[in-house]
Image (tube, rainbow, N blue to C red):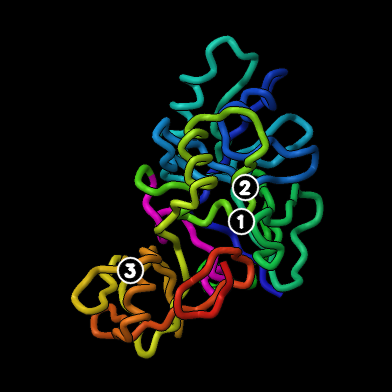
Amino acid sequence: MPIALFGQRALARIDGADAAHFLDNLLTARTPAPGTARYAALLTPQGKIIADMFVYAVEEGFRLDVPADRLPDLLKRLTLYRLRAKVEIAALEGWRVGIAWNGAEPPAGVAAFADPRLPALGIRFLLPPGVAVAEDADEAAWQAHRVALGVPEGGRDFAYADAFPHEADMDQLHGIDFDKGCYVGQEIVSRMQHRGTARTRVVPFAVCGPAPAPGTAILAGGKTLGTVGSGVEGRVLALIRLDRLAEARESGLAIEADGVTLVPERLDWASFAIPGTGSAA
């Protein structure tokens, strides 16, 4: 029952009387109830993902769990949006984020939250400075678990400042609240939802041979369908044009990346159709 610590995650604190309202006005999902977590993103006004994150509601306020390389820009943007709100925004130095999965329990006495995207992803926990934990796995093992579940990760399966939330499957993974009030980029996200215009998605492919390297172009009949992202033995995730994938399947064309054949697979947690898998729209 594995436990691991993430090497490239960072934490920020958002505290103060206006913290909940402040985040609710900015992020794609509502702020969580005390003791719970939400998956959300801060977007550009054009609807592109600046950073996706986990928002944890703790006794003091909120904690944001983000990719470490996105934290400086996120803090800068949140500070610009603060204006006169009674909010304290700062990095949490020395804190680490861990994950327990496949039935493992997080360490006793630390703040812990079920992954709000999919329960099968495990339980995330926040480790204060100077507190040790007995790891019995490494992050790579959890990444393989994530890929097996078909769940995208920013910086690996979609590019920040370039992808829309629907392309990163955030609408399928509880990262967008379509009933909440306004937030940055909401108009674009709502339009994509109601018009069904998300032509590009991260989807899984079975690999018949060695997994192609991340960033490798996926081709069919000389036409580019998308690019390879995360991979493990026998499976990769890929950011793919669904309409071009449908054309390739209908035409009986082989789908390849660096000479390796790829076969689309269905996602049990997704409601959108993946051409060639028999999944329903």
Q: Given contact means CB atoms under 8 Å apart, are the residues at marks 2 and 3 in contact?
A: no
Kindly report which numbered mark, 1 or 2, lies closer to the viewer in this rendering: 1
- Above or below residue 263? Residue 200 is above
- The image shows residue 59 at horizontal and vertical percentages of 79, 33
| Residue bearing the label numbered 1 | 173
Residue 88 in view in this figure: yes
Classed neighbour count for the residue bearing mark 1: other residues with Cα under 10 Å, few (<14), some (14–19), many (≥20): some
- Above or below residue 192? Residue 246 is below
Kindly report which numbered mark, 3 or 1, lies closer to the viewer in this rendering: 3
- The image shows residue 98 at horizontal and vertical percentages of 63, 57
Q: Given contact means CB atoms under 8 Å apart, are the residues at marks 1 and 2 in contact?
A: yes
Mark 3 lies on a secondary structure that is: helix
Check residue 190 for magenta coloring.
Answer: no
- The image shows residue 1 at horizontal and vertical percentages of 71, 75
Check residue 156 for magenta coloring.
Answer: yes
Viewport quadrant of the C terminus: bottom right
Point 62% across, 32% down: residue: 13
Point 45% across, 27% down: residue: 77
| Residue bearing the label numbered 3 | 244
| Residue bearing the label numbered 2 | 39
What is the distance, in whole Å, between disc 2 and disc 3 at their CAs?
A: 30 Å
Kindly report which numbered mark, 2 or 3, lies closer to the viewer in this rendering: 3
Magenta segment's dominant SS is: loop
Mark positioned earlier in the residue sequence (1 or 2): 2
